[in-house]
Image (cartoon, grey):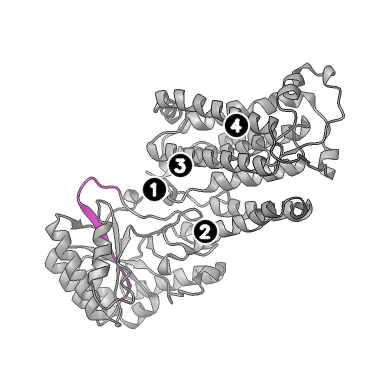
Amino acid sequence: MSPIDSPPFWPDQLRSRFAAHWLLKAWLIPLFMTGFFAGYFHLLRHPLFPVTIIPLTALDRLIMFRPAAVWIYASLWFYALLGAVILRGRREFFVYGVAVVTLTVVGFGTFLIWPNATPPPHADWALYPSFRFLETVDAAGNACPSLHVAFAVFTAVWLERLLRQGGASAVVRALNGAWCLAIVYSTLATKQHVAIDALAGTTLGGAVGLFDPRAPGSDLRAPYSRLNRLWLALAVSATAKIFLFTFGLARIHPAMAALLFFGPDLWMLAGLLVPNVGSLIPTATRFATDRREVWLTIDDGPEPATTILMLDLLDRHGAKATFFAIGEKASAHPELVAEIRRRGHTVGNHTQTHPLAAFWLAGPRRTASEVDACDDALEHAGAALSPWFRAPAGIKTLFLRRVLARRRRVLVGWSARGRDKFRVSSAAPLRRLKRNLRPGAILLIHESAAHGAARVALLSALLEHLSTTGYRCVLPGRDALR
């Protein structure tokens, strides 16, 4: 079921999320908070190095001191708690837990090697009883990055993700964003943090909140939105560089400056260049099944030297496969595309020209052209439009998410591949495929004129092994992908 067709998030799904694993939440959340505050205050009271005072900016002078904002400031702990208590399912728990620990470790590591604090505010705390606790306990230390802001932004990203999956209304999601912005503002209005702290906290919370290398199946079918991990990652990268150059962090701490400058970009490059990493673009790497079934996918055809021989092998074993075809080859050999379809297999889009080296640099027009031209070639060859798209060698572009979402396509990766592109023998690729064989796996092999006999032999050996071990090659539906 897609997010658009999901039942109302409120109150049914929300109630079930609160009830899920309530005992685990009841002891894990207090345990984490106890450890968090113990570590936070230890670093605050026992700095290892001289404490750096974070400078004020024009924004800090513009925002007036607002005592009433202390209640919004304090609401973070309920807000962050809300994000944790509506988790449901092992995967959500695991990814959320790793992200929270990562955020905490990065923040504490910063405070350890670079203790810092905000300038003393020009305010008489005796006039504001509600601030006495903050003055006594927090002392405006451990300021940059502001973990208050980091946890608010992190929670906002996670709640947006869960609310969209649950079908929450735009009003509810807007309230989530407004609450986060109010908390960020309150850190400046209460003078607990300065603008540099808030900017660094936004960068940290956004970066950690966005990281999700294995997107769940619902994300694969979610409608395109500007509020997605890709564009937020670009915002994190830009914010980090603005923070670096505007406030001269390189002079204060060169190591942290290097981390801010290169860290977000390296993370984005990994999302584009590393196959099957769905941190920027949701990627299917398996499908849901309780039976011994796999999805066999064959790339880089159609190819006269291999396609018919592979089709004969598939017929002999009663196996089905998806051929991810290159548009130029489909135009050159439309009879092979028609034969693939005639024998009951499906054809997926593998770009028009298979631009292996430069695809990650493609702009929006080139990205769309590679997809659309391949679609046209496959249609002219008699193949129905398929929801499946596979990027060349798993390499993505910054614009691929939007292009695929607007065409209602799913980016298909793989669970196991033979790395058979330059191999003559089929023994090593077969071992790699067998090593990662499990129910729901997406298997990848190739066809081409180069080493065509070895590629056909690999398919033959793989099909024999699947038959011996009781596996069937099936064509999964869109809703089964994960």
* Marks 3 and 4 in Cβ contact (< 8 Å): no
Kind of residue sitting beneath label 2: Arg
Q: Closer to the observer: label 4 or label 1? A: 4
Task: Calculate the distance from the C-alpha at mark 4 to the C-alpha at mark 1.
Answer: 37 Å
Task: Indicate which disc, 2 or 4, sits on the residue closer to the N terminus.
Answer: 4
Kind of residue sitting beneath label 4: Gly
Residue beneath label 3, please? 95
Q: Closer to the observer: label 3 or label 2? A: 3
Q: Closer to the observer: label 2 or label 4? A: 4
In terms of secondary structure, where does tag 1 sit?
A: helix
Query: Residue 114 placed where, x, y %?
Result: 70, 43
Residue ID at (68%, 45%): 200
Residue ID at (45%, 70%): 372
Residue beneath label 4, please? 39
Query: Residue 226 placed where, x, y %?
Result: 58, 51
Task: Calculate the distance from the C-alpha at mark 2 to the C-alpha at mark 1.
Answer: 17 Å
Residue beneath label 1, please? 217
Task: Indicate which disc, 2 or 1, sits on the residue closer to the N terminus.
Answer: 1
The magenta stretch is 288-301
Task: Calculate the distance from the C-alpha at mark 3 to the C-alpha at mark 2.
Answer: 25 Å
